[in-house]
């Protein structure tokens, strides 16, 4: 095996490793998004104040 073939194979292996890292990152991101969607559908986690009127659920100024 000559030097050019070895360098080529090493570069291909490195490119494959980079693709694997990117794919793993995307897969983890998708899994986290799915987990969040399921938790939202099941109502898990802290209650959401997204559908309440303005001023509801805010901090109260007790010093005034």
Image (spheres, rainbow, N blue to C red):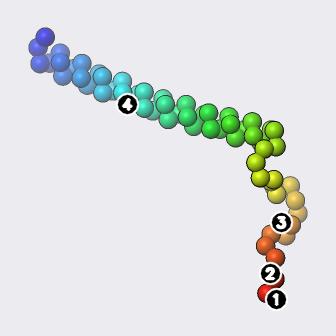
Q: Nearer the viewer, mark 3 or mark 4?
A: 3
Using the numbered discs, state the Cα–Cα distance from disc 3 to disc 2 in whole angstroms: 12 Å
Q: Nearer the viewer, mark 4 or mark 2?
A: 2
| Residue at the disc numbered 4 | 18
In the rendered structure, the answer to whether residue 60 lies left or right of residue 32 reads right
SS at circle 4:
helix
In the rendered structure, the answer to whether residue 31 lies left or right of residue 26 reads right
| Residue at the disc numbered 2 | 61
Pointers 1 and 2 in contact (C-beta within 8 Å): yes
Using the numbered discs, state the Cα–Cα distance from disc 1 to disc 4 in whole angstroms: 58 Å
Pointers 4 and 2 in contact (C-beta within 8 Å): no
Using the numbered discs, state the Cα–Cα distance from disc 3 to disc 4 in whole angstroms: 46 Å
Using the numbered discs, state the Cα–Cα distance from disc 4 to disc 2 in whole angstroms: 53 Å
Q: Earlier in the sequence, mark 3 or mark 4?
A: 4
Mark 4 surroundings within 10 Å by alpha-carbon count, few (fewer than 14), some (14 through 19), many (20 or more) = few
Q: Earlier in the sequence, mark 4 or mark 2?
A: 4
Q: Quadrant of the C terminus?
A: bottom right
Q: Residue furthest left?
A: 2
Pointers 3 and 4 in contact (C-beta within 8 Å): no
Q: Nearer the viewer, mark 1 or mark 4?
A: 1
**In the rendered image, is residue 54 in sight?**
no
In the rendered image, residue 41, in percent from the top left (x then y), is placed at 80, 38
In the rendered structure, the answer to whether residue 31 lies left or right of residue 24 reads right
Pointers 3 and 1 in contact (C-beta within 8 Å): no
- Residue at 36% over, 24% down: 16
Tell me the quarter of the picture where residue 61 sits: bottom right
Mark 1 surroundings within 10 Å by alpha-carbon count, few (fewer than 14), some (14 through 19), many (20 or more) = few
* Mark number, residue 64: 1
SS at circle 2:
loop
SS at circle 3:
loop
């Amino acid at each position: 095996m000559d030097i050019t073939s070895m360098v080529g194979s090493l570069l291909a292996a490195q490119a494959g490793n980079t693709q694997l890292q990117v794919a793993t990152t995307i897969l983890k991101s998708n899994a986290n998004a799915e987990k969040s969607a399921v938790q939202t559908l099941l109502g898990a986690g802290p209650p959401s104040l997204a559908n309440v009127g303005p001023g509801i659920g805010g901090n109260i100024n007790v010093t005034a």
